[in-house]
Amino acid sequence: MSQQSPLLRGSQDEPVSLRSVQVQARLQGLLLSLQSRQTYRNDTGNNLETVYTFPMGWGATLLGLHVEIAGKRLQGAVLEKKEATEQYEQAIDSGDTPVMVHKSAAGLYTANLGNLMPGETAVIELEYAQLLSLEQGRIRLTIPTTIAPRYGPEHAQGGLAAHETARASAMVAYPFTLSLALSGPAANGRLRCPSHPVDIQAAGDGVTVTLEPGAWLDRDFVLTIDALADASFAVAATHDHQHAAIASFCPQLPAQEIPQEIPPLNLKILVDCSGSMAGDSMAQARWALGEVFQLLGPTDRVSYTRFGSTVQHLIPKLTPCTQRFVRGALAKALQRTAADLGGTEIKQALASTFAIKHPSQNRDAPGADSAVLLITDGDVWDVQATIASAKASGHRLFAIGVGSAPAESLLRQLAEETGGACELVTPNESMVQAMVRMVLRMHSSRPVDLSVDWGLTPLWQSPLGQQLYDGQTLHVCAQFAQPLTGAPTLTWVSGEHSGSTRAVLGDSASESTIVRMAGSQQIAQTHSKQQALALAIQYQLVTDQTNLILVHVRSEGNKAVGLPSLEQIEQMQAAGWGGFGSARGSRIEFGVMGSPAVWRGRSSASALVASKGGEANYEVPAFLRKQVQAEGDLIQRYAYDSSFDIRMAPSEATPQHLLRALSNAHAAKNFDDALAQVLSENIPADIKRLVASLTKQLGDKATAWAMFLDWIMGQLSNPMAGHTPVHRQSQRLVRWQLVRTDAKDLLRGQKKLAAALAHLSSDSWGEVKLTLALRIGKAFKTLAV
């Protein structure tokens, strides 16, 4: 039985409906299958809509949705995003209870639960599967639980919708329980859980790992399994007349000769020194770097950079790593490495580090043979731009993610897209060992030609890549016209060396899971949006174009009345983030985990900051030093489009201004209150006259404005085109104002608006084509003036 949270109130001092998260998982071979149950209860006096954004494991495939409510168990279905959203909103309007799950950003999903009535409890159950990797005899299993605070605007850069949030709060606490069953070779390995106290028990032919009571959603669950023999596995399955296979190869490459075959490293070290790294993370990084310097030889060259809101190249050139250099310049650089540089401008820091030249190259060509060792928690929202910049640089990026909840999606993708590698390290793991493994990878990587013999010609196969590390797992998915019966073989050629590895074909845990996971990989490689959508519907998978949805239809006497109150469920503060509390120690620093880490006093969570005049110092908590506000952040409460500059706003409101004002009125109790905020804008006279003509037609000013706002929302609803996304609650206020409007009047009004605003854009009304009567009235008014 899970314990009750001692504090279930959010930042708005309202009861929080999320009560707990329970996880049941199973690891067979390298396939992790997981069920996560989110329990919600409405203890307020109002109908609620809860919106909870949560992380999922890297490369995980979301497979299913079930909901338990009012004694019923319902199953969700995958629909095209627009259709699913329309069904969700229709259910809200009808007083029913819809549940919708969609992908919000890389590695993040959002569960929407509408019309949870006072006193009701609902359980959202999600199923997903993930392929793990066996690397150098070790499996690292991570189940993400919270989203640490990230640098930058979550809407403009992170892609979250206006009604979603990933804000962290020190005032919420969500209990967490977990049971993990291991079978096969993993059950015979050496188990260690560096994140939580656990109970490990033999169970039949396997092992069960259970969290001890008192766990919270304030850190990722991590289990390491060591002392495993390198092995290659394969599973094949048939489901709904689809035949697929997944092979996990772990080839052993011949050792390279020293020094003939091992070129010296050109290593650019880049260390995150933002406020979020204070405490556990920075202490780990400094210790590990000091140890790793001893692994480098005089033929290796090193530069050293630290970054936060700014970039500081402490060693700005690739310099031979002699003992004198290690004990002198590198030691001094390490002493200056502290979490005192504010925000996390990782894109700028990477670009500046990529630009460091090798001495033998000309000024215009950064070293393509260089590797970057990045140490960071990765807590930024600007993910895609950062990845694109790294991919174009020609550098291999080796990322070490630190902390109790690092942003795995960014770091994994950075490494994958550049031919590098990634490791995550909790405060209770050895970062030294992780860095040693990274240096070995840098030395052992080599270009290879790869091919797989399945015994059948595949209809489709996932890419094999062109680089391989010794002891690295290579997952390959394929689809066939008939069932696979033989074990596949991987063949590789690297220079004068070649070899092959044959996988052991085993039984699959779930036929449908294997087929759908292979389908997920096919979608990821599909360039046609139309084809990707068709595949997502076929395999019932959540993608950027599809959502999972179900609706609990209520009886007529039990329908919800009115709009539900929106509850954006905040994240628990990640343990040890920014030096706030700590996640270190065998009992995670707090006895029997009786309270979340963030409530347990301060470590080195603050720093002395000098005033500009140099006359006084002020102690500022690290979590307040997380970032320097960019211009987009300063205006975020006015706009979800951070490129809009309030200081440059024209005297008259543009369509974008009105939609922004409407969006910011989402907390209004009714449409009249929201409309008052919209009308406070400096609206052009022609637009007022246009709405006045609608008012004459409809007989009601509020309904006329609702029709007008609804129409321009429909025309300017694409955020990818630079349009301002309007908050979900604001859209509902408009829709509810129009619910009693006659369909014929609505159609006539839309035609009038289309004719009058034929050249509408986000920033311009175009030429407002008014009727003759309106123009005559306008002319008389001008003469009178």
Image: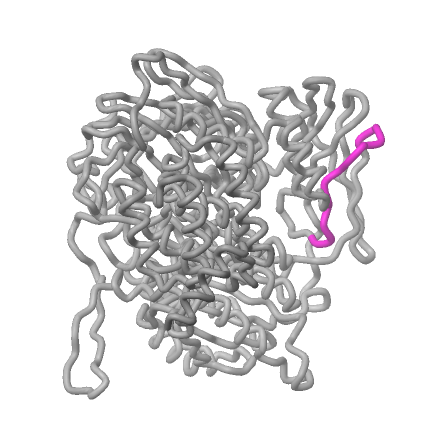
606 or 772: nearer the viewer: 772
Give the side of residue 687 with respect to residue 266, left or right.
left
Query: In this picture, is 443 found above or below 141?
Result: below
Tell me the quarter of the picture where residue 669 sits: top left
Give the side of residue 541 with respect to residue 146, left or right.
right
Quarter of the image for the N terminus: give it.
top left
Report the span colored magenta: 454-467
**Picture colour scheme:** one colour
Query: In this picture, is 670 found above or below 328?
Result: above
The question of residue 456 being in magenta is answered with yes
The question of residue 72 being in magenta is answered with no
Picture coordinates of residue 304, whole percent (x, y): 47, 75
Picture coordinates of residue 771, whole percent (x, y): 54, 54
- Magenta: main secondary structure equals loop
For image coordinates 46% across by 75% down, the residue present is: 305
Picture coordinates of residue 226, whole percent (x, y): 48, 39
Tell me the quarter of the picture where residue 171 sits: top left
Q: Is residue 574 visible?
A: no
211 or 547: nearer the viewer: 547
Give the side of residue 256 with respect to residue 199, left or right.
right
For image coordinates 71% across by 58% down, the residue present is: 446
For image coordinates 72% across by 44% down, the residue present is: 528
Give the side of residue 605 with respect to residue 638, left or right.
left
